[in-house]
Amino acid sequence: MEKVEVFENKRATGYNEFVGAWIPNYSYFLSKLPDLLSETKNKDLLVAGCGTGNEIVCFVKNSKQWSITGVDPSPEMIIQAKEKLKNYNNVNLIKGVVSDVEKTHKFGAATLLLVLHFMKDDGTKLSLLKSIAERLESNAPFVLLDITGTKKQLKDNLQVLKQLLPNNLTEEDINNRFYRIENELNAVSEERLSELLIEAGFEAPVRFFQTSIYMGWITKKWEN
Ligand SMILES: C[S@@+](CC[C@H](N)C(=O)[O-])C[C@H]1O[C@@H](n2cnc3c(N)ncnc32)[C@H](O)[C@@H]1O
């Protein structure tokens, strides 16, 4: 069973406001996902940890060609995604984890945004990445957004992030969030992320996006 970080109550209902405030350029990142994957021939997309459906909305608004499976274990997040996406018949939402998706279903692309840093690097990150790789066809692109960096990089980049945050956040909010990022979440260095992806069955990733501690990566499933 994959480890699950459950989003419920305020964490679920206030989620969109939270990401908008704390992740500069998050909506820009999302808006560019369809462009990034535009050359993918097989438009069958796996959105792992789809939350409230933010990344799925960008794909369905961009084109009718995509067929999308969103998976998320948090009931309150998937309820919001279902409501947001109820008018699209090319979206299938599953309350569960990636290993609940049939292994015989081979997707043409996948995303994993803001999920991996909740998992420990004790085999848990690797097992989620492997579950995704096993459900992709050869050469399928895989896009990640995650808190990334060594302890020193995170510390330095958090000082930059502080300057980019909205003015209505209190000093206490900022200190609490930064404490959590440095001490309770499980970010890994760029090198370690690359090792994990390679071990899971992907090529070495390319970093194409960064805002302070948040890095966007693209890789593809190895050719079998
Ligand atoms: C920070 S939210 C990101 C949601 C969405 N990707 C976005 O960018 O808006 C993290 C999500 O990961 C989900 N999650 C937790 N454990 C998971 C797992 N093992 N597999 C997939 N998703 C998981 C949570 O339920 C939550 O909705």
Image (cartoon, rainbow, N blue to C red):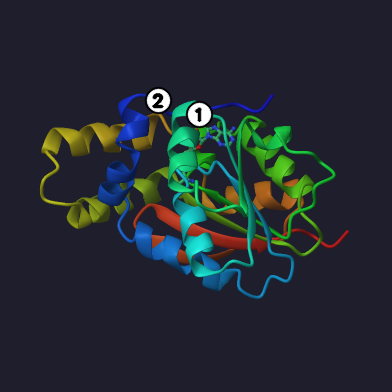
* Quarter of the image that includes the C terminus: bottom right
The disc at residue 8 is 2
* Quarter of the image that includes the N terminus: top right
Q: Where does the image place residue 96, in percent across and percent down from the top left? A: 62, 30
Label 2 with label 1: CB-CB less than 8 Å: yes
Q: Amino acid at mark 1?
A: Ser
Q: Say which quarter of the image contains residue 76.
A: top left
Q: Where does the image place residue 6, in percent across and percent down from the top left? A: 48, 26
Instruction: Check disc 1 and report the residue beneath it.
Output: 74
Q: Residue at x 30, y 57 (%)?
A: 24
In this rendering, position of residue 147 left or right of residue 121? left
Q: Residues within 10 Å of mark 2 (few under 14, many from 20)?
A: some
Classify mark 1: helix, strand or loop.
Answer: loop
Q: Is residue 31 above or below residue 119?
A: below
**How far apart in space, not on screen, are marks 2 and 1 (Cα)?**
7 Å
Q: Residue at x 73, y 60 (%)?
A: 108
Q: Is residue 124 above or below residue 61?
A: above
Classify mark 2: helix, strand or loop.
Answer: loop
Q: Residue at x 59, y 63 (%)?
A: 218
The reply to whether residue 156 is in sight is yes
Q: Is residue 203 above or below residue 20?
A: below
Q: Residue at x 53, y 61 (%)?
A: 60
The reply to whether residue 205 is in sight is no
Q: Nearer the viewer, residue 161 or 60?
A: 60
Q: Where does the image place residue 42, in percent across and percent down from the top left? A: 74, 66
Q: Say which quarter of the image contains residue 101.
A: top right
The disc at residue 214 is none
Q: Is residue 160 above or below residue 121?
A: below
Note whether ligand 1 is within 8 Å of mark 1: yes
Q: Nearer the viewer, residue 218 or 19?
A: 19
- Decide which of tag 2 and tag 1 comes sooner along the chain: 2
Q: Nearer the viewer, residue 176 or 43?
A: 43
